[in-house]
Every structure is written in structure tokens, then in C-alpha cells.
Image (cartoon, rainbow, N blue to C red):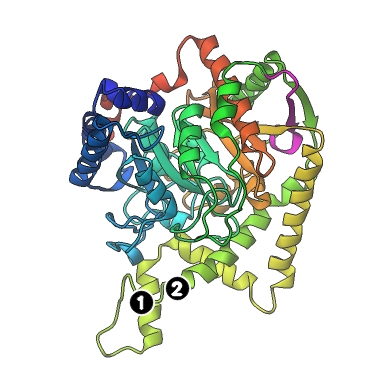
Amino acid sequence: MSELTRLSAEEIARRVQAREVSSVEVTRAHLDRIEAVDGGLNAFLHVDRDTALAAAEAVDAEIASGTVRGPLAGVPVAVKDNIATKDLPTSCASRILEGWRPPYDATVVRRLRDGGLVPLGKTNLDEFAMGGSNENSAFGAVRNPWDPSRVPGGSSGGSAAATAAGEAPLALGSDTGGSIRQPGAFTGIVGVKPTYGTVSRYGLVAFSSSLDQIGTFGRSVLDAALLHEVIGGHDPADQTSIDAPLPPVVEATMAGARGDLAGVRVGVVRELSGEGNQPGVLTAFTDAVRVLTDLGADVVEVDCPSFTYAVPAYYLIAPSEASSNLARFDAMRYGLRVGDDGSHSTDEVMSLTREAGFGPEVKRRIMIGTHALSAGSYDALYGRAQKARTLIVRDFAAAFEHCDVLVSPTVPTTAFPLGERVDDPVAMYLADLCTIPTNLAGNAALSVPCGVSSDDGLPVGLQVMAPALADDRAYRVAAAYELARDTSSGTPFAATIPEPAVLETSS
């Protein structure tokens, strides 16, 4: 691996802006890394080498003239392929949108470009972001850099794998029920779900509109925070955007990096941190909580009984919204069209297209959602799920009256083998047990690596949850923990990025 692909985003930005290295050199190093190892990962769906290098060259010219667009100017970034980009296809990893090029950039992509970041390409995902393993992509599963026989998590598995493997120092993902935090935990990197409405969803292809949130991946808490501040803030183009100042996440991260959590109240969620967790995960989590105590935090156990309803409530609410959002893919306006040979009616063309274009998991969720919204089932299913959602919001509110942040394992297990849960949707859905409550409530949460499981040597994530518009609290706690973890081990966790030889064995 090139030295440049080992550096943090913050260090890359510092060196590029000091003209110690050029953005072109950094970008080329990451493009070469993609070419060398992505055959064994399948993390990227689209890469445009020439466009990326041209963007890097433009940044270098600006820096040479004394202009620096932002704190991450010159740093490469990967973008999940359900976020609109006008110069690259946006397929959502689905045959129904294969080859589609949006006529505009999503707000977050525009902000990346305005900030001088260099998009490398679009990353693989579970089709339309529906999945927890990145095995539902129409273009093949993504593999975990730590063990290519295992999943990287989903749905943002491509972005997570690319960041963990050194193909990109930063990446964007989307989190509907844990789709950033879960792959972050599985691949040993930081994954952040901001407060709902604080990062624009304009240009994000909708899965579940009341739950979807764009967020960030980085190999350190600071890197994720720097990218968060680039893409965050109010956007008039997004009707769900909150017109309020973005929480000071970089400032909070710097404060946390001083290693003092005195006075911070941390709640361990009883319902998420006991029975049902893999032994090695629970051990790593318990050790992480002990570190927080050593840093001066006041750690207590809290009860959130309604969290037990989160998974069933989510898997009624999200599919219901998906069935409505995906109705737009009707073969009439854009995307795939099947059977339009003059022998089929409009309804038949629509049916044939959706049959050919959507994969099994997308079809499953459309059918669940359509049934939940039907006249005979609405009150018994969708209506009750929304009531459970209200109870979960109340449990968070009650817990945050006594705690500044809540913590839990990010996922009850480490990364599971490819194919293990493909035919067992319920087992797949239960992997989201710890992450879903935050999406239902709209709060902020992140996952930071807390070592590896003694069971299998795979990464474990510590989830830190904060109230809405208090994202900075989660960053402060995560940064303090990250410093203590790395100081204790003597080696930054990010230095465990797998070498190309490890990845090439799977290609």
C-alpha cells in the first residue's frame, strides 16, 4: 500500500495545502489502490479516473494561487451510489436504474466539490439501500477487507469497505436503520448518522423518507467530523432540512481528544447490551465502557423498554414508505423498460419492467409495505408501528434527562459469512437491533471501533447515541475513547488496514 493511502484525511489535507504533496499525487495513489485491490472487494461500481484527476489538478492550481476552498481541499472521497452525481451514473445497485446519469448533483456532492474534495467514484450497496450485508446488489456482493469470506455490512458496505481498505480516505453513505454504523463496525472504521434533517437529503434516492439520512465514514473520529461539517447545514431544497446551526462536531472532537470526560454522563442501554450479543462483542463493549469510566465519565445503566419494539416497528414503517417511494420506477419516465414492443399494454410494460428490474429483497419490502398500508391492515400494522415509534422517542427523551449520551454495541455480532443469512431475512433484520431505535427517533449516533472480538479477531463497534442536534456530544465521547484506545494499544486502530496481498487472495 502506498504511504499516501495510509494517511488520515486530515493529514492528507494538511500536506496538500502545504504543497508537500499534490492532490493529483494523492488521487492517483488512491485510484491505483482501487485498481490493485477492488477486484477482490467489489466496493466500487463506477470510477472515472480522468475526471477525478482533472478535479485534483484544479484544486492544486487553486492552492498554488493561494486559494484553499475548505479544510479538506484536495482530499479524495467516495460516494454511495444512491446519491445523485451528474458526472457519474447513479444506479442504486439496481438493474432498473443501470446506466442512469442524473442531470444534477445532490446537495452533499455539490458541497464536496465546493469544498475542494475530489470524488473518486460511486460505491456498491444493497439495492436501493435495502439490506444489511451488501449481498443484495444487482452487481455482486461486496467483501469485507478484514476477511473476504465475510460481509462488510450494509447497505453502505461499498463505502465502508473502500474506506477500510485504503481505497478512499473518506466516504459518504446513507443510514436508514443502521446502514452506516453497522458496516462501520464490521469493517473497523468510524461511521456517523447525523441528526435527521441536519444533512440535506436532496439528491438521495429515497428508500424511507422519514428515516433516511446521509452520513460519513472515516478511519478516525476527526476525519468523520471534518467531512460532516463540509456536507452539513440547512438546505432550502430539502423540505425536511432543519434551519438551525450545525452542531460544532469538529470542535467537540478536538475537545474529546484531550482525553477528559469528567462530568459526562454515559448511559448503558440495558436492552441492547446483554443477552443476545456475541460473547466477544460483549467483552469488547464491556472493556470500552470501562475505558469511559477511567476517562472520568459517570456511567450508569438505563432502561429503554420500548426499544424491544424497534425492529418490528421499523420493518413495517420502512417498507411502507419504500412501497410508495419506489412506485416512481414505472418504466414510463426513466430507467429500464421491458416489453415495450407494441404487444403489451402500459400496465403490462410496467409489471414486466418491475419484475425484471427489482431484486428479491426490494420486491419483498415493497410487498410488505403495500400490505401494511392496505385498508384492512393499516391500523393493525402501520398504525401500531407508528405508536411504537412514539414510545421509542419517549424512552430516548427519558434517558437523556439523566444522561448526556447512551452507549451500546453497534451490532450484536461481528461480520458474518457471505451467504449465511441470505435465505433468512429475519436473522438479517435482527442485525439492526441496536441501530434502528436512533433512526426511528431521529437522533444522532456514531460507531467507533472498540477493538476486535476474542471469538474471531474481527472488528467490534461501540455505538454512541446523542439527542437530536447534540451530535457534538457523541463526537466528544468517541474522540476521547479513540485516543485512550490507541494510547493503550500503542498503535492506531486505523493502522490495521489490510495489505493488498490479503485482498488479492479473494480475487
Quadrant in the rendering for residue 302: top right
**Residue 88 position in % (x across, y down):** 28, 54
Residue drawn at the location 26% of the way across and 23% of the way down: 19
In the image, the segment drawn in magenta is 261-274
Looking at the rendering, in which quadrant would you find the N terminus? Answer: top left
- Element type where label 2 sits in the image: helix
Give the vertical position of 156 relative to 241 (above or below).
above
Is 267 part of what is drawn in magenta? Answer: yes
Mark 1, secondary structure of its residue: loop
Measured as percent of width and height from the top left, residue 38 is found at 27, 38
How far across and how far down the image is residue 128, in percent? Answer: 44, 58
Q: Which residue is mark 2?
A: 328
In primary-sequence order, the first of circles 2 and 1 is 2
Kindly tell me whether residue 144 is visible in this rendering. Answer: no
Height in image: 131 above or below 220? below
Name the residue: 48% across, 23% down.
457
Residue 333 marker: 1
Most distant residue in the left direction: 50
Q: Is residue 282 magenta?
A: no
| Residue 190 image point, x, y percent | 50, 32
* Amino acid bearing label 2: Arg
Left or right of residue 208: residue 418: left
For the residues labelled 2 and 1, the Cα–Cα distance comes to: 9 Å
Asked whether residue 308 appears in the rendered view, the answer is: yes
